[in-house]
Image (tube, grey):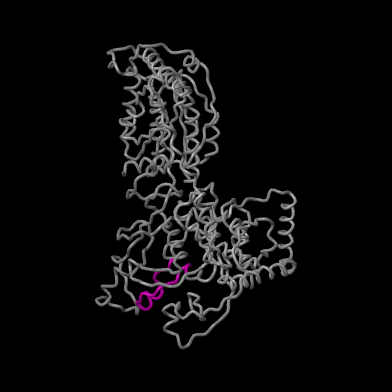
Amino acid sequence: MHHQVYPFSAIVGQDQLKQALILNAVNPAVGGVLIRGEKGTAKSTAVRALAALLPEISVVRGCPYSCDPGRLHDFCDLCRQNDGSIQESLRQTRVITLPLNATEDRVAGGIDFNQAIKKGRRVLQPGLLAKAHRGILYVDEVNLLDDHIVDIILDAAASGRNVIEREGISFAHSSRFILVGTMNPEEGELRPQLLDRFGLCAEISSEKDPENRATLIQRREEFDADPSGFIRRFESENNRIARQIVVASEFLNSITMPRHIRTLICEICTENNVAGHRADLVIEQAARAMAAFREHAEVTIDDIREVAMLALTHRKREAAPSPPPLPPQHDHDQKEEPPSEDNADEQEDSRENQEQDSRESGQGNQPEETGPPADSWESRPDSQPNDQERKNDVIDQIFETGETFKVKKFTTPKDRVLRRGSGRRSRTRIAQKQGRYVKSTSVAGTGDVALDATLRAAAPHQLHRENASGLAVVLRSEDIREKIRERRIGNFLLFLVDASGSMGARSRMIASKGAIMSLLLDAYQKRDRVAMISFRKSEAVVNLPPTSSIELAAGLLREMPVGGRTPLSAGIAKTYEVLRNYLLREPTARPIVIIITDGRSNVSLGEKKPMDEAVDFAARLSDDGRIRIIVVDTESQGLVKFGLAQKLAGAMNAQYYKIEDLKSESLLNIAKENAQ
């Protein structure tokens, strides 16, 4: 039964999406289209509707690679062997959908096990890239695919050939297709290198105009009630678009590109600070397709203007900020000037640090035994707490959330432990029949038989084994190999947040909330579970037990009060308690603890000094090798710095970051500086 497809011309709105698809249909050299937007916005409907517009293609009958009878030089090995008896047939352009859990052999092709067992021969089983040749490959949620699968698809799309080198098979075949990928940016981004490989990018959203929404609903109901009648209503418009695509494809090679237009393309790409030259080439190819579709003899500025947005949406970058001006070099001039606002802030921060330190050391819960070194922050007697700090200790405040940003990638190191789960953060071996098949083992455990490895293990022994059953291959238990699979899973992220009064000074909590919110957004994209503990006054509180609800965590963060003293030891002890219970339930988990603090502990649980006790507790927490710890230092960058959070990180063997270094671009700059 022929499947009836919703008409392309009946789709309401989504002009950017439809234009990007048409340009790729006219000129596949554009390089495909990435569709970014929420679910239920006609993405797959538009792709299938476009395929219905495309003309039938001529293929070699029976060829699994859809070879074109008119391109003898492009024949696969099978068609070359049958060159004298080639028969043609016509078929509709295919839309091949790539499943989210597709394996490498399913995508690229692998060994045909039926042939291997029945005839003892290694024969290639064509993959989805073979089926997609001369058609459309539709990849839904491309951002959730494993990177190595995306690499295979993009390599084939760019080169027009699929090369298979696996399981003793070496084979290559043509694989030219229109690549259409979809993604919801809220569920995670693609790497910039992969983004750049998509020619165009269409940003889509649900229809906002009530009239258009009503029309959309009405048309959908009419199509569901009478598909044939609905299709006939839009047949004339569909045929017009189909003819335009055919004529434009034939007319494409005659389109001229004036020199000043090509120069304009380069200027646009330079102004948008794009990396490399792929954007220039894509704009040129898309502009040619646009001119051909409009039946222009040469590319115009209007053509460039329309396609540039589609080609640059996912490529343009913010220009690097210019360096600040150098300060004046005349010392006597500076002495005569009043202190600037920034200098005043630094001096205030220095006084604040000193006053806070003096107050905190004098008001601990334990009597002084032996005075700390003179340069210790706990023994500075030079001042008493100022009015602002007393206010911070007494009055609870709620600070707004600072600006969010893209954070550094946090993962845990790989090991040999088998785990279950899903997510997108850490790559691990998986105790399920899912994930990427990376190698085989003779150790039984999962029941996930690696047939290719089993056949290879049995092959050398076939001449010496009795074959009473007449099977092509005689297998024994010692031949059996099982698959070792890898996939990404989510982690458990525990946020330990300093909510004491010192965090309220100099907008530290605003910046800290912004950093935590950024980490929560990253956790949502990676499918992590999260928990949150805050410490202030004299105790630590579990604000949020382990959960997958990032929204709940974000809401609690926004309403988190700040004020009081800094019981860092209590926070670490509470963290240990929560992790101990979690690891009893999930012994294979690899939690990540993210501690956000300035390290100024001034409340202890026992007789030790607050900072010494906190360091001891921290060392105990780090004894469990399953726990990874990250310390984010919120101390202001003033004239006087105590480095207590860094000391804490050292005691825990934790990764240490200043709060501003959490930004991925900051860490990239640090890596570049270290490499030079």
312 to 562, vertically: above or below: below
Rendered location of residue 52, percent (x, y): 63, 69
Q: Seen in the image, is 101 located left or right of residue 230?
A: left
610 to 71, vertically: above or below: above
Q: In the rendered image, which quarter contains the N terminus? A: bottom right
Residue 106 in view of the camera = no
Magenta-drawn stretch contains 118: yes
| Quadrant assignment, res 48 | bottom right
Q: Which of 128 and 76 is in front in this view?
A: 76
Rendered location of residue 366, percent (x, y): 35, 14
Q: In the rendered image, which quarter contains the C terminus? A: top left
Pick out the residue farthest to the left.
464
Label total for image: 0
Residue 458 in view of the camera = yes
Rendered location of residue 453, percent (x, y): 33, 66
Residue segment shown in magenta: 108-129
Magenta-drawn stretch contains 488: no
Q: Nearer the viewer, residue 253 or 235?
A: 253
626 to 48, vertically: above or below: above
Rendered location of residue 467, percent (x, y): 30, 78
Q: Seen in the image, is 622 located left or right of residue 184?
A: left
Q: Residue at x 32, y 32 (%)?
A: 652
Q: Which of 568 and 638 is in front in this view?
A: 638
Q: Which of 49 and 4 is in front in this view?
A: 49
